[in-house]
Each structure stands twice: as structure tokens, then as C-alpha cells.
Image (cartoon, coloured by chain):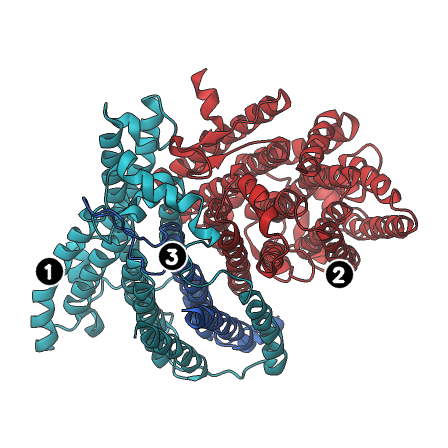
Amino acid sequence: MSLVQHLSALQVVVPLLSAPLIVLLRPPGLAWAAATATSLMAFTIAIALAIGVSNGNNFAYEMGSWPAPYGITLGVDAFSAILLLITTGASSFALVGGKRSIDSQVEASRQPLFYSAWLLLLAGLVGIVVATDAFNIFVFMEISSLASYVLIAGGPDRRALPAVFKYLIMGTIGATFYLIGVGLIYMMTGTLNLADMAVRIQDVSDQSPILVAAGFITIGLALKAAVFPLHLWLPNAYTHAPHAVTVFLAACATKVALYVLIRFDFIVFQPNLAGHALQFAYFLMPLALLAIIVASAAALFEPNLKRLLAYSSVAQIGYISLGASLVSKAGLTASVLHIFNHSLAKGALFLSVACLAMGFSSTRLEALAGAGRTMPWTMAAFTIAGLSLIGVPGTAGFISKWYLISAVLNEGALGVGLAAVIVVSSLMAAVYIWKVIEVAYFQLPHDGSTAVREAPIELLAVTGLAALANIYYGLFSDVPVSLSSDAAQLLLGVTP
Amino acid sequence: MELLGYYNYWVFAILLVIGLYTVIAKGNLIKKLLGLSIFQSAVFLMYITMNKVEGGTAPIILKGATDQIFSNPLPQVLILTAIVVGVSTTAVGLAIVVRIKETYGSIEEHQIFEADQTP
Amino acid sequence: MIIFFAVFLLTLLVITAIAIVRTENLFVAVMLTSIFSLLMAANFFILDAADVALTEAAIGAGVTTVIFLSALSLTAERERSQTTAKWLTIGVVSVTALVLMYATFDKPLLGDPNAPVHQHVAPWYLENTPILIDIPNVVTAVLSSFRGYDTLGEVFVVFAACIGVLFLLSAGNGIKAEDETPKSQGLRHHLIPKVVGRLLVPFIVLFGLYVQFHGEYGPGGGFQAGAIIATAFILHALLEGERAALAAMPRAALLGMAVAGAMLYGMVGVVCIALGGNFLDYSVLHSNPVIGQQIGIIVIEAGVGITVCGALLSIFHAFTSRRGLN
């Protein structure tokens, strides 16, 4: 099929061009249907790309048929393939199941605009992932950011507004820092294409603008990726956003920023800047550890379920950064694998929260008493996903934690300490998941809530599917593992 | 020329931190957005500064004229895009501020924070 | 001579920025921001960036000021709060400034033609634009063709802002301005603005169209043109009032314009795929690839102009027709 050669471009173009059309769809429900269809098409393209990548195709594409570095090129490799799968997958799951959840939170007359923004977010995120040009990444990063600000503020909760304002400020500062860094590198090398940069930076690698550029790019992307301590925008933004939006964002938005950070660092900086590998490790590892400990602790004492899970996300981003900071094949494999598995776990968890929110009036833990009785299927899915988050054997979370611990133990004495941190934080995760389970199963329902019925069938089905995916990929993990180790190989193997 | 070049970069650094200071330290939401705007404009100045070639002109090629020195077209393209992105972000930010004013009655950060603590 | 002028402009920029930070009256701050943008545009012009200067003046000084003012009318005029954590912030930002200044000394000198940034990609564009695309304005060539995918992204950023503002400001129960209040009558009763403004509006539109179609030959292009034409309509709305303005260009038409422009750009790309090239490869649009490039550029620039105009006007009307919950 001649379309195959255009697949990497189509991955972006399909959601991008559907967004303006959806704005014009007035009849209720039609906007949702169109958005869901587009998202599923994007998911199919992502699967096709992933299959192609494992067959060795790299889908290099020249926009406008101009060769790099004069034009903009796209490319998909193992690392990109994993991110495309989780991004389009999360979007599709959230849309297929979330119709009634969105209906309950966004007025029908505004829904075409809402779904249009959703597709713009999807287009922006996949645009970042398939890009190989530093400025192109900036443009699509801004598309996805603007769209996410709009979506987060879409619900009825007024506390979303200050939260999204803070996110806007911090996100724009992050994007502008990234732009400064790219400008400095361009000033010293004369190119914007990542692969070309990696070659040309060797001549100027010891000069101060390059180091300053590396710093700015790292901080800018860390702001977007919610790396501790720049994560302050995340808890409130995730908590007060509409529930379907939280599913989509939690599964993939920060991961894409981490993807850019890891890619930039390993492909452009590390082969060329002497000692950069060590600087990267010394900079990132303490922050990763702090993220894991502090965020897990914050989750322990949090009375609101959504914010609890948001803090847990910050901790999980800490795991991913920890793996990357080891600068070893094992560490990177664990890191990329955890990107995949965490999005499965968190996606399923937030989907169950969306289910719960359809029955209960609040997401505060005390309001959810007795949910195990009134919404048994939902809580079953939540429990499975929670076990995956903790890393219980048999679930996907266990596989990535196992890889992470083995990668860490390669580091000698320091490694034992790191492994201890990982184990302790998993125990903390067990405690906060247990808190939820205890309220749901072991407390009696409040008077008003015995009339609560189970969530709508489509939402429940999608949630169940996501939860079961955690078990499936816990038992049959060869596909994610092979993609992750290919990705790690690619990232490390770019030495000239 | 050398002094001017350095002066350009220093002004960029000064404007950057003025903007950043405004965003972080000021409590009024509209002031923060103005600071963000200054912050972004400073970055544009940096890019365009590196665009200039001594003795050159704007990169518009006139037919028949040979031997012209032109300044670099690429940073201009990037900054055109960045300006538009900046104004889009400002517009969305202002819409959020208007909504905040309507629901909270204030656009001062500390008052909004207190309002959320009470329930 | 130019050097002194440039130094003077740069210093004025810093002074204006400090003034913006320190003033408590937000109206004054917004006006100063407008002046800041104009000074920045002048600076860009001195640095040979004509297209960027035009864009900064039209969008930065023009549109941004209007949007800020309409938002101000819905919020507050004075800043009331104290500055928080003043010294800590000053410390942090000073460190940032010093780091940047440290990096200054290794940078290539201003105007040095042997700097890396002027090698490699830039000379290729300057040499090959007459051969491959044959339009005089190299910036337009790079923007619309060589890096046309970025510009597609940029159009969609504008579109995203448009639907974002529309979505946010359609929530809840802000009273719509279809009711005739004194405010919505505009400046109808002020004679001088009315007469002068009515004379100016058609000329501004004409200038905007000139900028649109001359983008290939001189500074200009879709973004600037869209902003200028939008300014003309905003002037009309200020003079005649909200009702008359919306009767002339209803909201649905504006949203339609934003959608149409973006789709036009995207469809050009899809047509290119259908004709056998890559996405946004204009050379397949005509048997002569150079003519194909020019056709492609004209069409997408039109798309850009339409979207920018529609989006900016939608945003303006969204702000001005929202009455707060007073």
C-alpha cells in the first residue's frame, strides 16, 4: 500500500486535520463519535508503525521532499514507537469509555470545542514524538500545551482555573527555556536537525554557550516533565481536570517531555560533551530519588484520591528518571519499559476514578466508603491496577521494577542503596493503595450512597480492559521489553 | 560592532530576568502575563541578534543584482513562529484570568489561594 | 551612527521593561508593553529582520495590546498585592543573568559572516531559493516551503488559541452583548474618531491585502496580513459598537474563517500526497516544479491569513462580549 511510506506523516496529519472539522459538528454526540474515530485511526497507525519498526523500518520522511537539514524530517524508531502506542492508546481508551463522564462535566454546546482541543492535544503529542528537528518539537509542544490548558479548565471545578494558570506560566517558562537552549546550540552549530547537531557539535563542544544551552534545555524540559522540584503544577492540574482528561494526561503527557529530554541528552550531548554523562547522572539522580521519596510520602497523607494518584505519578516519573540517570543499557531499558507500564497502570487507575466519580459526588477518600460493595467491578479493576503500581509479581509493574532493581544493582554499593529506596517506596505505594482499598471494602457505605449503581457499561468495559492489560503485559512482556531494549540500544549506541 | 554585539546579549539577559522576576514575584495575574510577554520578547531579541551579517541587508533577493550580502533568513522564520505562539499563549492566559476573576472575584494570587483554603 | 541609535534603543527597552514591572496601574503597564513591542520592532528592523519587525509591530504592539485591554476591562485596573519573596527571587534571577552573560563571551561576534550560524544551512537557502522557488523574499520561501511543516504547526497554534479562548469564555453565564447597553454603542457619539476611523478602515484592509499578496516579493505574508486586516475590523468594532460589528461579521463566520484557513493549508498537503509527492511537497502541483512551488506558497499563505484574521477577531469578540458576573 503506497500509504505505508507516508505513515509517519499521517500519524500527525490525521488528528491534526480532524480537529478543525470537529468544531463544525453541532449535533450532540457527533463530535464525540468523530473524535473517537480519529483517535482509533491514530492508534491503528501507531500499531502499524510499531510493527514496522520491529521489522527494521525507520519511516524516515522528508516534509515537502526537502532533505535534512534544509527541510524538516520525521522519523520513528523503537523509542518513538512505544510512546506513540501509549499516547494514541490512552487517548482512545479515554474517549471510548469516557463519553458519559465528559457529558456530565462539559455542557453539550461546548463539546465540539472540547473534542477539537482533545484532538489537537493528541496531534501535538504525536507530532513531538515523530519529530527529528529541534524547533519542530517546540512548535508541537506548544500546540499540545495550549490544548491541554484548555482541556484541564474544561470541567465544572473552579479550582482548575488557578491550577491551569500556574501550569500555563510554568509550562511557558519551560518551553521558552527550551527555545533559549535550542537558539544557543543553533548559534554555535548552524543547524536544527538533531542528528546533524550531534555531528556538528563536536567542533564546538567545549565552549560555554553549549554547556549553558544544555542546562537550559534540561531545565525547560524538566519543567514540562514534572521532574522534582519543578512538579508543582501537576497535582492540582490533574486533580481538578475533568476525569477523562486526567486519564489521557496522566498516561502520557509528561512522558513525552521526558522522551524529548532523554533523546536530546543521549543523542546530542552525551557523545560529544566530555564528562556530560557524569554531570547528567549527578544532576538527575538526586532529583529522581527526592521525587520518589517525597512524592510517595505526600501521597500517603493525601485525603483526595485524585491528588493521591497525582503525587504517585510524580514518584513514578522519579523511577523513570532514575533509570535514565544510570546511563547504562540496563537502566535505560528499565526506564523506557516503565514509561510503558506506568501508563498502563495509571491509565487504568484514573479510568476507575472516572467510574467512581460517576457514582459518587466527590473523590475524597472518605466519600468513597463502601465502594467495594456498590461498585464491585470498578473496585476490582482499581485493585488490579493498584497492584501493578506497587509492583506485585504477575503484573506489568513488577516487570519494570524488576528491571530497574537489576539495573541499579549493577552500580555496586550505591546500587544497593538505590535498590533499598525503590523497595521502600514500593512499600509506601502499598500503603496508600491499601488506604483506598480499606475505605472501599472495609467501611460501610454512607446513607446516601447505597443507591449508587455501577458505572456505565462502556466506561466499565474500558477500565476492565485496561486493568487486564496490566496482567497480560505482566505475564507476556516480550513485546514491550524488546522494544525497550532496542530503544536503549539506540540511545546509547550513537557514539561516533 | 563588537561592543554592540555584547550589548545586545547583555540586554537580552537583563530583559530575561526582568520578565522572569515579574512572573515569579508579582502576585497580580495580569502582571505575571505581562512579565511572561517581556520574557519571551527577550528570547526573540537573542535569536534576531545572531541573524545579522555585517554590511548585509534583509534577505530579499533583487533580480539582476549580484554580489549582495544578506543576513540570515532562518532565525527570522523561527522567531515569526515564536511571536505567534507567544500571542496565542497570552490570549489563552488572559481568558483564564477573566474566568478566575468571575469565579473568585479577584486576580490577586494570595486572595485566590485563601479562597480555596476555606472549604 | 547606527551603533549609537541601536544602543539607545536597547537601553530604552530595558527602561521600559523596568517601568512595566514597577507601575501599579495595569492600564499604564499595558500601554508601556505596547511601546516595548514597538521599540523591539524597531530593533529588529535595524538588525535586518524586516519580516519579523512587521510581525512584531502588527501582532505584538497591535493585537496583544487590544486583547490585554479587553481583558483589563473585565478584571481590575490596579494591582493590589504585595510582591512575594522579593529578595529570593532577585537572587535566583541574578544567577540566571550571570550565567547567560558568562556564555556571552564565547559567542560569535555580532555580524561576523564566518559564524557557524551563517554557514551550512543559510547559504544553501540563499543560493537555492532563486533556483528552486524563484521568489525574492527568502524568508517567505523558508517559512512556507522549506520549513512549511513548522508553519502548519504555527497555524494550528493560532487555531488552538482561538478555540481555547472560545471554549473558556463560553462557560457559565456571562451576559452576552446582544443587549443594547450604552457601552455596546461604541464611539458613535464621538465625532472625530468616527469620521477619521471610517476613512481609515478601508485603507487598512487594502494595506493588509497588499501585505498578504506581496509576501513573496517583500516583507509580509499571511501572519502579518491577517493581523492587519483583523485590526481594521477591530477598529470598526470599536467605532460602531459590538452589535454593528457582529452584524457585519457574525461570530459563526469568524469561526468558519479560522477553520477554513487551517483546513486549506492542510488540504494542500494532502493534495500533494494524492499527486504522488510527500506531504507539503508543492513541486507536484504543476508540471513545472518551480511554478508548483509558487502556487503552493500563494495558497498556503492565503490559508494562514484567513485563519489568523478569523482567529484574532473571534478572540477579540469573545472578550468584548463577555460581561462579568457583576
Q: Secondary structure at mark 2?
A: helix
The picture places residue C193, in percent across and down from the top left corner, at 12, 74
Marks 3, 1 in one chain: yes
Q: Closest to the observer: C90 or A105? A: C90
Mark 1 residue crowding within 10 angstroms, few (<14) / some (14–19) / many (20+): few
- The chain that hosts pointer 2 is A
In the displayed structure image, the side of residue B52 where residue A469 appears, left or right: right
Residue C322 visible, this angle? no
Circle number at residue C165: 3
Q: Secondary structure at mark 3?
A: helix
In front: mark 3 or mark 1? 1
Circle number at residue B71: none
- The chain that hosts pointer 1 is C
- The image quadrant where one finds the C terminus of chain A is top right
Name the residue that disc number 1 marks.
C203
The shade of chain C is cyan
Name the residue that disc number 2 marks.
A298
The picture places residue A481, in percent across and down from the top left corner, at 74, 30
The shade of chain B is blue
Q: Quadrant of residue C197?
A: bottom left
The amino acid beneath tag 1 is Phe
Image position of A154 with respect to C272: above or below: below
Image position of A12 with respect to A52: above or below: below
Identity of the residue drawn at 35% across and 50% down: B73
The amino acid beneath tag 3 is Val
